[in-house]
Image (cartoon, rainbow, N blue to C red):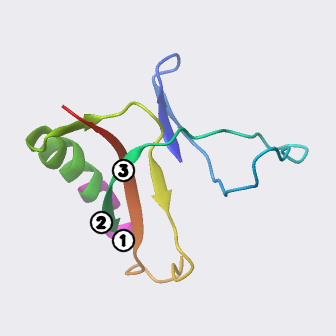
Amino acid sequence: MDAYDESTGGWDYIAAFSVNAGSTAPAGMVKLDIPTATYAVFPCTMPTIQETYDMIYQQWLPQSGYEHAHTPELERYGMTFNPEDPNSQFEICVPVTQK
């Protein structure tokens, strides 16, 4: 999950996983509730990550009927993702609302 932090001008990047409602975070971890959202989902590989983000923000989003929902973005690494294979796919999930 990543989100732009306006107070620092940087990005917060958090490795996350889902847990049951009402659970508590183990020591040294934080719990973050991600609001329900509609996501535009883009397949990606590690070698194309910057190119994919550029395409999303410079081409797709301005030309679509959507705008960023200003909630956290997600990168979803499924069960078949292999970090040792540069062609292994994952998904960039951008929260959107209709313009």
How far apart are the two marked residues, 1 and 3, measured between alpha carbons? 18 Å
Q: Secondary structure at mark 3?
A: strand
**Does the magenta stretch mainly form a helix, a strand or a loop?**
helix
For the point 74% across and 40% down, the residue is 31
Question: Which of the 4 image quadrants contains residue 88?
Answer: bottom left
Where residue 96 appears, x then y in whole percent?
A: 31, 41
The amino acid beneath tag 1 is Thr
Q: Nearer the viewer, residue 86 or 70?
A: 70
How far apart are the two marked residues, 2 and 1, measured between alpha carbons? 5 Å
Is 71 placed left or right of 22 in the picture? left
Circle 1 sits on which residue? 45
The amino acid beneath tag 2 is Thr
For the point 74% across and 55% down, the residue is 19
Circle 3 sits on which residue? 39
Circle 2 sits on which residue? 48
Instruction: Give the magenta part as a residue range.
Output: 45-51
Q: Are marks 1 and 3 in contact (CB under 8 Å)?
A: no
Where residue 7 appears, x then y in whole percent?
A: 52, 16
Q: Is residue 35 above or below residue 23?
A: above
Q: Secondary structure at mark 2?
A: helix
The amino acid beneath tag 3 is Tyr
Q: Nearer the viewer, residue 20 or 64?
A: 20
For the point 83% across and 47% down, the residue is 23
